[in-house]
Structures are given as C-alpha cells and as structure tokens.
Image: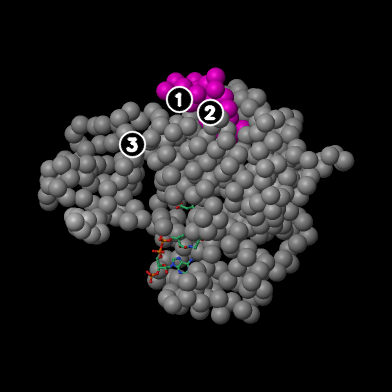
Amino acid sequence: MTKQYANIVVSDTQTPNGLPILKGSIGPDAVDVRTLLGRQNLLTYDPGFRSTASCESAITYIDGEAGQLLYRGYPIEELATRCGFSEVAHLLMYGELPASEQLSGFQCKINEYNLLHDQVLSFYHGFRRDAHPMAVMVGVVGALSAFYQDSQDYSRDEDQHKAAIRLVAKMPAIAAASYTYSIGRPIRHPDNNLDYASNFLQMMFGKPNEPYHVDPVLARAIEMIFILHADHEQNASTSTVRMAASSGANPFACVASGIATLWGPAHGGANEAVLTMLEDIGSPDRIPEIVRRAKDKNDPFRLMGFGHRVYRNYDPRAALIRDTTRQVLAHLGMENSPLMATALELERVALEDDYFIEKKLYPNVDFYSGILLRAMGFPSRMFTAVFAVARTVGWVSHWLELKQQAGHGIDRPRQLYTGPTLRHLDK
Ligand code: SDX
C-alpha cells in the first residue's frame, strides 16, 4: 500500500490502462478516474450513479448483498434497540457515541435551539390549509436561510455546528406545525421537559385544551423510526444536499433541497405510496393481481416499498420496523389490522415469486413504516415529513463532513452529448 490522501489508501495495483485503484476501510475498491479526461480525453458514463463513488465518507456503510447497515461502524440493529435518538444523532454528526456529560450537553443545545422564530411561524399562514406538508417544509426550511445573520460565516467551525444543531433541533417543530396548521389547530411549541421523540409527539397530537400524556410505547416507536431513517450514505436526497453544499450554499437551503428530493415517490415519498397501494389492494385476495401488474413490463406500476438500489437482500430497517409495528398494533389493540395482514401476505407472496427472487427485490424501509405511522395517528401525508425529520441528522452530518473535506471543490459532472453538432443561422 502506498501514499494516502484523506483516509483513502492507494492500492499497489492499477487498472489495465494505468488508473490507480483506491481502497476505503470496507466495501468495494474504486478506480480513480480523476485524470481520465485530462490524460485520455475520456469520460465515464454512469447515469443514476450505479457504479459511482461520488465522495469519500466515514459516516454510514451499507453492504447491499449482506443487508448490513452501519452508522460509524455500529450495526443498525444494535443502535436501534439499545440507544436513544440523541445518542445516535451525536454519533452520526460527531463520529462517536456521547459520554453522559456530552449527551446532556448535546440535549441542552437541542433544547436551546428548538423554538421557531415568531416570524417563521407566520410563514405557515401563507400556505393553503391543504398544502402537502413536504411543500410547506421545503419552503419553511429554505426560508431559515434568511435568519441567523449573526452566525452565517460557514468557514468557521462554530457557525457550522450551530447551523447543524439548529436544523436538527427545529425540524420536529417545523414538521408538526405543517400538520397542526393543516387541521386548524394552534401550532404548539416544544416542551423541554420531554425528550426529542416525545416532544415531537406532543407537538403533533397535543391539544391546547387538555394535557398531553406521552405513551411510552409510542414514544419509543417514533424514536426507533427516527434512528432507522437518520442516514443512509449517498442516497438521492443526501447526494443533493452534498451537491448543494459543494457550491457553498447556505446549509438551510441545502437541507431544503434534500427535503425536496426526499419527497419523490421513488425515494422517501414511497412510505405514503405504500399505504395508498395497500388501501387500494383492499384485501389479500387481490394480491395475485397486484403482483402480476408489478411484474408486467408494460405496466408502469411498481410494488411500492419493494426494491432498493443498494440492498440486494432484506433491508435491515424493514425487519426492525415490521417487528415494532407488530408491537405497537398489539399495544393499541389493533393486532387484526387489515393493512398489516395485507402487507404480510404481499411480502410472503412476492418473496416466493421468481421475478422478485431473481431481481433480488425485498421490502425496504418504507414497506411497513406507513402502517406503523398510521396506527400511531399520523395522516399518510405526514409520513415523508417524519422521514425528513429523521434524515435531517444525516443531511447535516454529511454537510459537516463535506465542509471539513478541504479541496473537494464544486460538484460539476459532465455528460455524453448527443445533441446537434455545430450549425449556424441561415444568412
Ligand atoms: C428509499 O437510496 C437509498 O438509500 C434510499 C433509502 C434511504 O434510506 O435514503 O433507502 C430510502 O428511497 C427506499 C426506496 C423507496 N422506493 C420504493 O419503494 C419505490 C419502489 N421501488 C423502486 O422504484 C426501485 O426499486 C428503486 C427506485 C427503489 C430502486 O430502483 P433502481 O435501483 O433504479 O432499480 P431499477 O429501476 O433499475 O430496477 C431493476 C429491475 C427492473 O426490472 P428490469 O428492467 O431489470 O427488467 O427491478 C425492477 C425494475 O422493473 N424493479 C421492480 C421494483 N423495483 C425494481 N419491479 C417491481 N416493483 C418494484 N418495486
């Protein structure tokens, strides 16, 4: 092994045409193509980035074949069942699980910044009551760029970390307000006697005319949802945040671009689409028709909540959410939920079908999360908003990491041009 740059190691072997091969700590090696255009006048062609490492990162690792997900090296199963959300957020943002005094300091910072400026609250009144929560969140989070003039020098570590904490701290209130505003209920403020997950529930479901009692089973369930959705390496929305950040854009604007990307039904919007699909199916006896449609190349219908660009195995998050969903349904006396029965039968049928087996299509994080959130009282339009609250931790973690990666420069891909060659206007 020879010279290192950043934390990447250059292998002693090269490609047949002399390109260096780079090694990370785990995962596939990468061909260093940075000199390809200059030395061989060649581009790489990889629409959808199926075989492209867009950056170096030390935050999250996914082994798609094994169905393994690590946050800073820790398996998601251990973090989701043994840690709190604040601990996992600290791990993703700063690289290590916090010691107890670090944890209380982190939680104090979250509590210091979780209120929304009164003028931010006025933005909500500019939206229609029936605006989709994700449309509201894109607007409100982007508008935060116009605040905090005293700490917008993002070349300074202090301002970087203040912006990151502000985003994580404020997202639950921003998301909850997009729901309460839509139903005409007064927007609620955080209660710093509650932890992050419980605070979100009270801002979502608390009423001004009666005390709100946090159900510990539901609080733990939403905390599990937050942990499982917190980060997922270079997914579409995180890649968008990193690309926006590479231009030096304001972090609130960068996260707003991530929210916009997450909203897509091929990405975070799938949890809402899964519930619509399960409701359309209605009962298990319509499943064979649905599976046939999902396999039909001439039918644009896809099994929502199934398949993944990286996982060629069961998404470990889906298994954890399925088990939590069963626990919450039993806790709420809804163990005979027809939605859950349809989902379990659909999973069973699909996983026994050659089409899904050959293409290695398994349930992903979105397949069961909607059933769980619906049982907890969330309207389906809020499912992706919940995902966005959680993924804000990942987005700011990658934003902080990129700010530390000196020399990364602006992300500026090229293209394979197939348009008209040079031509001139008629005389
Ligand atoms: C998330 O990237 C991340 O990490 C995302 C995420 C995160 O935490 O950030 O994990 C969150 O976005 C999960 C994915 C949520 N989306 C869905 O559930 C929507 C349904 N899934 C598909 O649209 C699809 O599986 C994707 C978008 C998730 C992945 O698409 P790819 O990798 O581009 O795969 P593909 O479209 O090339 O499909 C490969 C083959 C195709 O058949 P062929 O053309 O090879 O014959 O598999 C088929 C597809 O038709 N296929 C499906 C299918 N998904 C893929 N067929 C039916 N139903 C499906 N769901």
Tell me the amino acid under the disc marked 2.
Answer: Ala
Q: Which residue is disc 2 drawn over?
A: 163
Q: Which residue is disc 3 drawn over?
A: 410
Q: CA distance from mark 2 to mark 3?
A: 21 Å
Q: Is residue 393 visible?
A: no
Asked whether the beta carbons under mark 3 and mark 1 sit within 8 Å of each other, the answer is no
Q: Nearer the viewer, residue 114 or 219?
A: 114
Q: Nearer the viewer, residue 271 or 197?
A: 271
Q: Which residue is disc 1 drawn over?
A: 154
Question: Counting other residues with Cα less than 10 Å from the Cα at mark 3, is it few (<14), some (14-19), or many (20 or more)?
Answer: few
Q: Upstream in the sequence, badge 1 or badge 2?
A: 1
Q: For disc 2, does the CB lie below 8 Å from ligand 1?
A: no
Element type at marker 3? loop
The image quadrant where one finds the C terminus is: bottom left
Tell me the amino acid under the disc marked 1.
Answer: Tyr
Q: Position of residue 161 (x, y in %)?
A: 51, 26
Magenta region: 147-169
